[in-house]
Image: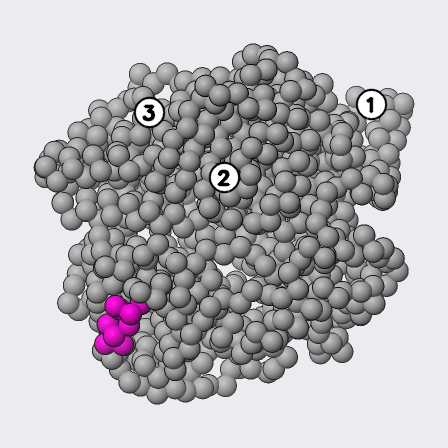
Amino acid sequence: MTNEHGFKEISREYLSELNGEAVIYEHEKTGGRVLSVINNDENKTFGISFRTPPENSTGLPHILEHSVLCGSKKYPVKEPFVELLKCSLQTFLNAMTYPDKTVYPVASPNEQDFRNLVGVYLDAVFFPNLTPNTLMQEGWHYVPEEDGSLSYKGVVFNEMKGAYSSPDSLLYEATQHSLFPDITYGLDSGGDPEVIPELTFDEFMAFHAKYYHPSNAYAFFYGDDDPEHRLVMLDEYFSQFEKIDPKSEIGMQAPFEKPVTVEKKYAASDDGNQKAMFTLNFGISHSRESMADLELSVLEQILIGLPSSPLRKALNDSGLGEDMAGVGLENELRQLYFSTGLKGINAEDAPKVEELIFSTLKELVAESIAREDIDAALNTIEFSLRENNTGSYPRGLSVMITAMTSWLYDEHPLEYVRYEQPLAELKDRIEKGERIFEPLIEEIFLNNNYRSSVLLLPDSKVGPEREEREKAKLAAARKEMDEADYKAVVAKAAELQKEQEAHDDPEALATIPRLKVSDLDKEGKEIVCEEKGERLFHDLDTNGIIYLDLAFDFAGLEDRLIPYLPLFGKALAQTGTKSTDFVTMSRRMAAKTGGLYVSTIANSKHAQDETYSRFVLRGKATAERNADLLSIMSEILREASLDNKERIRQLVLETKARKEQGLVPSGHIMAATRMKARFNEAGYINELMNGITGLEFLRELAKRVDDDFDSVVADLEEIRSTILNQANLLTNVTLDSKNFGAVENSISDMIGTLPVGSRNLVQRKRSAFSKAEGLCIPAQVNYVAKGADVYEHGYEYSGAAHVISRYLRTGYLWDKVRVQGGAYGSFSMFDRAAGSLSFVSYRDPNLTRTLDTYDGVAEYLYSLKVNSDELEKAILGGIGEIDNYMLPDAKGYTSMVRHLSGEDAAFRQSIREQVLGCSEQDFRNFGAAARSVAEHGDIVVLGSRKAMEESGLDLDLVDVL
């Protein structure tokens, strides 16, 4: 063992899975744990995690996660987290609360910036400035109203009101709690809004002292930064503590002697259209290790991973529900569990769903699982592991979360990171004919009393009854207060407001470390792109994977057909073809490729009254399997069975159910989409496909599938004949040049199998929208939007607009809407191409107050004195957003979108220069844009009908759910 900067090295090994070395350390003084991954990934990642098992459902771990980022010993500003958002080149900056741990990850491709982030986070978690006001702001506090009554406010309080308005969230919580009633997983670490106000400041402080300690810490580093300096940074903090025993072990739930049944309710509207949800859930008691977990992951994929998977297909084919329910295999906790079921069922059909699950599983054991299903599942998992495509998230973050699934429970941190050996062994066992998955089905499902059934019922009384309970608690609290007590509440609220409105001391702000503008690249980096007619090629190292996008122009599609497009994309891939049935095609896709899926693009061209719109079939595979990928893509484009009534019906119901369930968690997106539909053709198209209009279309379509399916088929076939041809096609390939040379001709041959066709253009007839809309859903929170086309009112674009819009999001709006207003978040959304500027809030307890805040943006910008330090921070954040880190497939897709937009490298460089040259005058100019929103803007509110009716606003109210 070697000793280095207060740490002793426990082990060191090279992992091909990480293309680097993994070193495990232990801090000698405190026992703090470190996993240090050294490789050539420039997107450097750090995370520090703590075991934080809650003792109740007050949301203490969650509230503390927010609170430690509100100022610390070394960085005594109100919110260092927000200051970092303003001025860092970060590619990830957040914190997350799990049922048994709290994690604080950061990432940046710039080493000095990365060190800055790590330093601020370490000081935040170990030496936060926690005060009663911190708990009041982030957790909960009493707000004295004008009539002498009380109400509650707090960021987490309102965030969790939003979560408890989501049936999906409630079902997830009820499922987990049903299986773990006796341990920490039976509690809500996020916080139950009815329990949050029971949290005291003493409990708050004691929790931090107990768990936020190096002896309870798991530190993780990943990337190409200096590995020795990692230990130096950690020891600076770890060495200030003495070793303790935090007694933070996560308990184990004893298996049930007999199954349990749980029935819960969720808030629904009065129309009676919402239906029940049901899950059947199985606790998994056997010990965890990499092979056992891999077997279960493959079994999950076999059973429900594909639309054609036997259990998923049986549930969908039953007609008992609209979409799958349950999380499948939950493997991020100490104990695994499996959950499946159906949404959109009639409550009385729950026993039928349970019986169907068991009968399907018994049949699989009796008749054996098809080898094709096993091969498809195994390839899907192997491709995912080898590709390691984490989307917009850093790869290091994925490795950290994987490591924590063993490390947190005192097992080796690399247990599930090392996948090569167990994968090879499992493939070998399968090849030899070993019967692996049928015995697992018997053990986990058929012979297991450790299970629960959860039924979630819609009830229009839930929302009003919840409100009445809250009012009664507040009234009781007020009744218990004498005059002195009430005056103390008033004083505390006033003190908090004064603190929230106060500006940080400039000297304190100067403590936040950051780069200088002079450290930034003056020239932007372009994505390599070679144009060959209607083909784009990006010569990038993709680790031998071909990413192929077939982008079809749908400018010739009539307005009435546009809402079909998301469904049409699913239908291409999930209905089978004239040559290949649905099940066989699904297996073939999974066994031979990395997956096929569809996206749509509809954007405005910059400062032009012109839209570019594309329907994109996206596929990926290893280069040696390109022939399989191309064959499948050609077949589904030409032959997809768009007349497969049962599959179309299932896809319509599934898509509708997901849109309905997404209204609460994604309410800000729905409100923003509705807002943008007013301003330009692209916004209108997106509303038709993805907005409330799209949801209304799906509801009507569900009826038409049953009553007039021939007309539905005719519409789908018209879409195919109109857009899926060579004339409309732009091909986009991302791959290294060596492999591209081997597949280029094959791609051309595949394209040659498509109809030649012709390109057309139709004139859109945009619908008119109300000036002030209220979209009503049964929720405890609102999503408030106000926006306008600012080009129409005279604003002239400058790249500086992106700096200022971001500055508003992390400054004025953050302070006014989140910190002071109690909403979970607020956004300033500026679309440079379309010229629309929208302000949108997220999980917001307010309505008119938020709109008043939006209307105050202009005056704020006009009167703002931006000193050189604040201006430089804003510019740094703006460049960080422009230079966002992307994996190869994202680079290729982004380059294609840039090509379609008509914006060239010179234009992008001009934006960069305008960002770098942003001045105080640009803030004034953007104030004019904000004023046009205040004076001419439309309003869209998604949320509670009661709140809208009581707002005094003249909103046109529409029941959406």
Q: Position of residue 754 (x, y in %)?
A: 26, 78
Pointer 2 local density, CA inside 10 Å: few below 14, some 14–19, many at least 20: many
Disc 2 to disc 1, how far (Cα)? 53 Å
Give percent across and percent down for residue 535.
37, 76
Which residue is tagged 1? 481
Specify the principal SS of the magenta part: helix
Image coordinates for residue 520, horizontal then vertical, percent: 67, 57
The amino acid sitting under disc 3 is Arg
Per the image, the residue denoted by label 2 is 222
Q: Which residue has dot 3 on it?
A: 288
Tell me which residue sits at (33%, 47%) in the image: 386
Residue at the image point whose x is 55% and y is 39% from the top: 226
The amino acid at mark 2 is: Tyr
Q: Quadrant of the N terminus?
A: top left
Residue at the image point whose x is 31% and y is 65% from the top: 738
Q: Which residues are magenta?
A: 740-750
Dot 2 or dot 1, earlier in sequence: 2
Q: Secondary structure at mark 2?
A: strand
